[in-house]
Image (cartoon, rainbow, N blue to C red):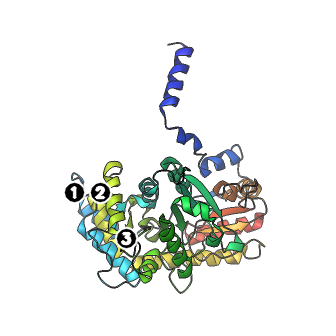
Amino acid sequence: MGKGSTRKILCFQADMLNERLDLLADYPFARLANLIAGATPRSNEAPVAMSVGDPQHQPPAFAAEIIAANADKWNTYPPLQGVPEFRQAIVGWLERRYKLAGGTIDFETQIAPVAGTREGLFIAALLAVGRAKGGKPPVALMPNPFYQVYYGAAVMAGAEPVFLTTTRATGFLPDLGAIPADTLARTAVFYLCTPGNPQGAVATRDYIRKAIGLAREHDFLLILDECYAELYYGDVPPPGGVEVAHAMGRGPAGHPLDNVVCFHTLSKRSSAAGMRSGFGVGSPATMTALNRLRSYSCAATPYPIQLASAALWRDEAHAIENRALYKAKFAAAARHLGKLPGFYSPQGGMFLWVDVGDGEAATKKLWEQAGIKVLPGRYLTKNEPDGSNTGIPFIRIALVHDLDTVERALARIAQVL
């Protein structure tokens, strides 16, 4: 086959693909690899990757024991909506965590298992983004900086991503009062993460109440990404969408969770990222539709993993221990980096968001001089309409390793910066 024929085939293949794929930029970690390509760390110590939010704590041993004890079920297709034990354990955790009365959440109709929050966040946009509003594409609101899945889901669903700036001045959360009325009128989904990634800001009850109010008023779906809900460092757990919505009362269609869906995962709470186990909770109408869409597009969580997941949701001791480990690491960060002008301690999550003046330059310097890999804030942030980028001065540091590794890495970061 000649070169001309090969080119024709490649052109044909490109033409048959969804053109929206062209709108997806390189993932941040691909950009990071290009930034530091060819640079060799001069440090004598082993390199430490603090660029990815990859939990390194070990999950409780009983999870693996339950999976092994149910190995005979690997040859069985699991129910897409989850076995009753799994859904009941989730509802029990929701009621304990958010101080809800028993029976507030119906385990039969309001829970959807997902393969980690990433899957749920993506398909929720496919569920909610519909036809054009007022002759214009529907809008997907999201914070800026943003989690890449929000953007990818919006683009592939056919929505126009609209980025809401979050800075120290806004409390690192979108300014809900600054969203133009015509934008709200076109909004189909609004992604909101609390505690946030990367800044670790926690939305108050009043803030969540206002966001839900906007969703009900303008008839869009508020997608609350609460994957870091159990990683908080104050005395009071962060509020969640489930408890705020129920306190507000019935929505437009008669249910407290109308226009709201919340996603949780065991990846952060239990350091069980490899299990790919999470869930969404919302109104019966929303979750029935979500499970219907999942039946066409997603694989069900394996039976042994559902049973292990149920045990993890029922157990609080390991979650408390996990949170204490992160709290100790953030205390170490304050000791090592607290004198930096751009340092602050986040309210939750697993990241530091540090103003270093030039995030890309600092990232290269840390890799070359200390063998520490962090992520430039620019790679998580879209340009503003005027071309500026609020993420340029920042780096994101993931405190995911054990305390000793984090202590030594922070000392190297402090020495360089």
Q: Examine the image and state in which quarter residue 63 appears.
A: bottom left
Where does the image place residue 69, in percent across and percent down from the top left?
A: 24, 63
Residue position marked by numbered label 1 in the rendering: 73
Q: Is residue 310 above or below residue 392?
A: below
Going by the numbered disc 3, the residue's amino acid type is Ala
Q: Position of residue 389 (x, y in %)?
A: 73, 57
Looking at the image, which is closer to me, 297 or 315? 297
Q: Earlier in the sequence, mark 3 or mark 1?
A: 1
**Position of 17 relative to 82 (above/below):** above
On the image, the x and y values in percent for residue 360 come to 74, 54
Mark 1, other Cα within 10 Å: few <14 / some 14–19 / many ≥20: some
Identify the residue under disc 2: 302
Residue occupying image coordinates x 24% and y 68%: 84
Where disc 2 sits, the SS reads loop
**Residue drawn at the location 65% of the way across and 47% of the way down:** 31
Q: CA separation, marks 3 and 1?
A: 40 Å
Q: Position of residue 2 (x, y in %)?
A: 53, 12
Say what amino acid the circle numbered 1 marks.
Lys
Is residue 112 in view?
Answer: no
Badge 3, how many Cα within 10 Å: few under 14, some, many 20+? few
Is residue 64 shown to the viewer in this render?
Answer: yes
Q: Which residue is mark 3?
A: 253
